[in-house]
Image: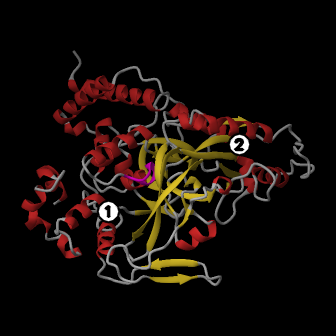
Amino acid sequence: MPRDIDRIEPLRRQIEKHNRLYHVEARPVISDREYDALLEELQRLEEKHPELVTPDSPTQRIGGEPISGFQAVEHAVAMLSIGNTYKLEGEKNSLRAWYNSTAKALGLATDEALAEPLFDDGGLALTLEPKVDGVAVSLRYEGGRLVRAVTRGDGQRGDDITQNVRTIRAIPLRLDAGAADIPAVLEVRGEIVMPNDEFARINAEREKAGEETYANPRNFTAGTLKQRDPKTVARRRLIFVAHGRGQVEPPACDTHSQFVELLRGLGIPVSPHAATVESFDQTVQYIEQFEIKRPTLAYGTDGVVIKVDRYDLRQQLGFTSKSPRWCVAYKYAAEQAVTKLLQVDWQVGKTGKLTPRATMAPVFVAGTTVTHATLHNYGEIQRKDIRLGDKVVIEKAGEIIPQVVQVVMAERPEDSKPIKPPDKCPDCKTPIETESDNEGKETLRCCPNPECDAQLRERLIWFAGRDQMDIEGLGEKVVHQLADAGLLKSFADVYRLQSRRGEMVQLERMGDGKVSNLL
């Protein structure tokens, strides 16, 4: 029977092999229980021999001590944003226009006016990849080992989130030792994303506990990566999809398609839906086919990224101040649906601003059932001539926030009723104040009373949020519940809750455990 110290390294390689089979090749050969048993065995051995623990051991993914803060780090190669287009043809900023101008800049197009540009070599090779709706990061490997993970930030500098990224099983801590030609320095750019089913699971648990649910996977992922406790990140089962490179020394690969294959060989997850084409027609065909496939993916996508494949041609094309000239993102139009407007309520925000909120007959759009949508302000209601009882077209802005786009005038019922804005605050009954633009359209309707209870509650919700005081457990529903019970009347009351524990545990759906976590 092998000695403990002889068992540790083969066990690490075995676990990393199963990580690769699951996350890169999508063909797991053992169950989650069997995987966990291997990991537990490794943990036991490393506890017996702590001198043999290495930073890239699979056990280090569990998460260490809480992080005191995030250090800003300079990118070796800038992480620029990508230009967008929403039209295939017919406009100045369409995909066709980008395609023709790119070919012309490379000296490949003989006539920009041609429906299909002519090329000296028969075609301009482009790589096409899904535009993953995640959080952009740069992973830096030195000697095949992960040494740093940095967010995009402002493109020049980002936050060092290495400790949190180490907990993500889809990201190898060391590259496949069996693969040839691992660059001494390899920076991999990609997206960290939360799978849809994991997002649904977490939201279901929070809803069951009476806690505020998260709005969308992308924002939740961003918040997760900035958690101070890596153990929290480890529990949220994030995944990674690589799509580009930063610094690579010595230089490797002449084309992006070769680089993708290199990453795949090193055990780094890449999109299985990436393709290489050599014409505009093939590009359009891919975009149309992928739009049908999008809903079946395990994570969110909002378009297709089109890139010049050859790196020497990319260097020739260069950059603008904001984005590369050698790539563009085609973004799909937001999914729309038609439903009936039933009611409009006016919500008071933390600054006193009144926002109209539509209640509609339930309708399924962009993956969820929608019953509410924003109407922005009364001026927008007037401009679109929205009335109660109307059939309205809704869509999710950025596939996140539902909004009313327009009225289906041809189906307006005879008994539709104009929407009347309130002249007093719905909560404190103070006369409201309004502002209008130069054309007389109302742009703002607000309650001027700083003591308004509705404003206070919204300020408390904001105050406890992740970007402010980050008080976990003090979400929207809990703030309203505590305020209804007379326990929250000011910011100072947040810090007096410890002395009112007995009253809190008596509230519905609170309980001793939930109160303890909040306090």
- The amino acid at mark 2 is Asp
Secondary element under disc 1, as helix, strand or loop, is loop
Q: From this viewpoint, which residue is outermost toward the front?
A: 414
Whether residue 325 can be seen here? yes
Quarter of the image for residue 168 reads: top left
Q: Residue at x 19, y 58 (%)?
A: 518
Q: Quadrant of the C terminus?
A: bottom left
Residue bounds of the magenta highlight: 214-219
- Residue 469 spot, x, y in % from top left: 29, 67
Q: Residues within 10 Å of mark 2 (few under 14, many from 20)?
A: many
Location of mark 2 (residue): 309
In the figure, 428 relative to 324: above or below?
Answer: below
- Residue 140 spot, x, y in % from top left: 47, 49
In the figure, 236 relative to 86: above or below?
Answer: above
- The amino acid at mark 1 is Gly
Location of mark 1 (residue): 69
Give the number of callouts: 2
Q: Residues within 10 Å of mark 1 (few under 14, many from 20)?
A: few
Left or right of 263 in this view: 48: left
Secondary element under disc 2, as helix, strand or loop, is loop
